[in-house]
Amino acid sequence: MSSHGVPMPMISHPAGPLTGRAEVPGDKSISHRSLIFGAMAVGETRITGLLEGEDVLDTAKAMRALGAEVVQHAPGEWSVHGVGVGGFAEPEDVIDCGNSGTGVRLIMGAVATHDFAVTFTGDASLRSRPMGRVSDPLALFGARAVGRAGGRLPMTLVGASEPVPVRYVTPVPSAQVKSAVLLAGLNAPGQTVVIEKEATRDHTERMLAGFGAEITVRETEEGREITLTGQPELKPQEIAVPRDPSSAAFPVCAALITPGSDVLVPGIGLNPTRAGLFTTLREMGADLSYENEREEGGEPVADLRAKFSPDMKGIEVPAERAASMIDEYPILSVVACFATGKTHCPGVKELRVKESDRIDAMAVGLRANGAVVDETEDSFTVHGMGPQGLPGGGEAQARLDHRIAMAFLIAGMGAKAPVRVDDAGPVATSFPIFEGLMGDLGAKLTRVNA
Ligand code: S3P
């Protein structure tokens, strides 16, 4: 469903070769953080390459509601006049984060150590997702939260008037939880410490250091320990947002499964906390190469070149790799249908609480298109059908989840028969140019009446 609430069914037809350059939009995680950290700095942060997807635009609105000046100058070019750490003002209305778990969880952290209350809500998907994983640690700072049963939105967070710093071991591998605690720690005196047993994406740590916060990371027996000194003055930054590896995954995987394809996806960040899918695809035997490897803004970057790969093999994806490819399991499960043998993905319980239950959404949709998929509470296995691939011909439900919608639209490109997605509207949350970009490569996507 689009933000206007009208479902947008789409059919993806088997495609000829996909060829050309796919310039994917800016990184969603870094775009949210650019706006939020910019709003907490003193002075003007300038951002280029910002993802203008619905999720990030909702975060921009929220920053305005909290008192920051957020201005778009040209496509992708934005500035944020920050109010400084501790400088947010009480918003006049409910903050609606739309579909975005990252938006709501990070902003809850950012306001939790301010002396006012904020009520948060979101769309039907976000209202079904657990927020206790964030409100529980925020309570340790002195904040109080009242939400619906099961810690669901709408939720009112009453910020701590006299916050205390916190030491917190994250019980789930989640960069959103880690970041919420660190953001709350920004306006608490003393040192806030977060320990994560498994490393998750580290954009918050890297970017806060860039904004001038005192933040250190060390490996301990308990895990990765991050220590942040509270109440810094954050210095405004010039941020060039790199292109999103999670969006790059879609044209890359489309090329691997569509006969004759050769696609170049330039300028993709290969931060090891994000690049797990590409390692996995290469282990499967995908013809995926890194060209022009370089460093940009302190991050490893490369141009990805993906070619049709009829000889891929199913593999065991190590559970330890899950955090570095957590958003990519839906599209991996599509590619796995085109490999020979089984692909087993253990340690992925977190997929059950994403924008949808992604294990179930993929299993049901792939089965409707002729695949065999087994699942347990925290794993799934795709039975590959070799280069013959997915029969297709079925419908998949997007369940208000952009990555499920895109994964099935890519499936249709390599399948024997078209794949219909009941609602491609959610794609606009993270990849608003998906339809045009894939069309330019040679994909055949058609909109149909609901
Ligand atoms: C994100 C963290 C991940 C990821 C999401 C973006 C972030 O969520 O799935 O798309 O920007 O911090 P979790 O923290 O729940 O794993």
Image (spheres, rainbow, N blue to C red):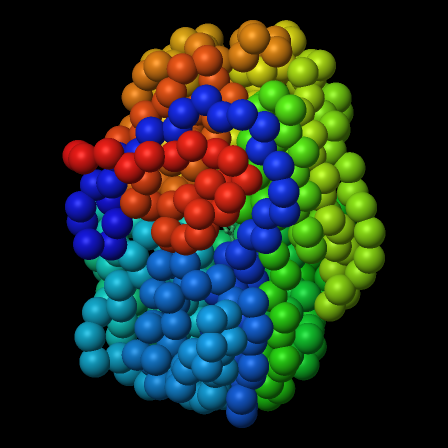
* Vertical placement of residue 213 versus 24, above or below: below
Residue at position x 43%, y 78% in the image: 72
Q: Is 349 in front, or is 256?
A: 256
Which of the 4 quarters of the picture holds residue 263? top right
Residue 300 visible in image:
yes
Q: In which quadrant is the C terminus drawn?
A: top left
Q: What percent of the width, then of the height, locates residue 408? A: 42, 28
Q: Is residue 112 above or below residue 346?
A: below
Tell me the residue at 58%/33% (across/down).
18
Judge whether residue 127 can be spotted in this image. no
Judge by depth and name the residue closer to the eye, 270 or 420. Answer: 420
Q: Nearer the viewer, residue 348 or 381?
A: 381
Residue reaching furthest to the bottom = 43
Determine the residue positioned at 63% across, 61% down: 242
Residue 274 position (above or below residue 444): below
Where the N terminus falls, by quadrant? top left
Q: Is residue 176 left or right of residue 66?
A: right
Answer with the quarter of the image where residue 253 lies. Answer: top right
Q: Nearer the viewer, residue 355 or 140?
A: 355
Task: Identify whether 129 is placed above or below 448.
Answer: below
Point out residue 422 in the picture as x, y percentages from the top left corner.
26, 31
